Amino acid sequence: KAYNLAGFTTVAISNGVYVSLFSAGFTPLNPAQVFDGPVSGYDLDYQTSLDELQASWDFSGDPCPIVQYEWKISRIDEVLIQDFTDTRLRTESANDGLEMTDG
């Protein structure tokens, strides 16, 4: 989730990016992208860690400056694991306190 100076927000989800409002309807210079894993521009297909989940994102195509990012973790059945957490202007974050199972 990103906030810009105009007070607008946008939300994106990896593997099929959904964006609610992008710069109040302005056409982005580049699409918003969210990646599974710590490296922006590279999306993981799988991971080996069962206690850590990492994500990175690129909203550099927004013509209005981003002033805050937030991220959350939810299961595919929409069960909330981590509510929106402020990352300030960092474009990556991780949660290493998870108890995931293989499958």
Image: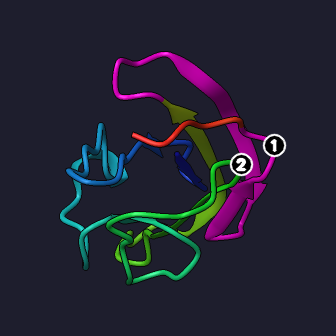
Picture disc at residue 66: none
Label 2 SS: loop
**Outermost residue, front side:** 102
Residue 101 position within the rendered picture, expressed as x and y whole percent measured from the top left? 55, 36
Label 1 SS: loop
Picture disc at residue 51: 2
Q: Residue at x 60, y 56 (%)?
A: 5
Q: Residue 64 versus residue 69: which sits nearer the camera?
A: 69
Q: Quadrant of the C terminus?
A: top left
Please indicate whether residue 56 sits to the left or right of residue 16 in the image: right
Residue contact between numbered discs 1 and 2, judged by CB atoms under 8 Å? yes
Residue type marked 1: Gly
Residue type marked 2: Asp
Q: Residue at x 23, y 58 (%)?
A: 26
Residue 44 position within the rendered picture, expressed as x and y whole percent measured from the top left? 38, 71
What span is colored magenta in the figure? 75-98
Q: Quadrant of residue 61?
A: bottom left
* In the image, residue 57 lies in the stretch drawn in magenta: no
Residue 67 position within the rendered picture, expressed as x and y whole percent measured from the top left? 67, 60
Distance of mark 1 from mark 2, alpha carbons? 6 Å
Query: Which residue does the numbered mark 1 point to in the structure image?
Result: 97
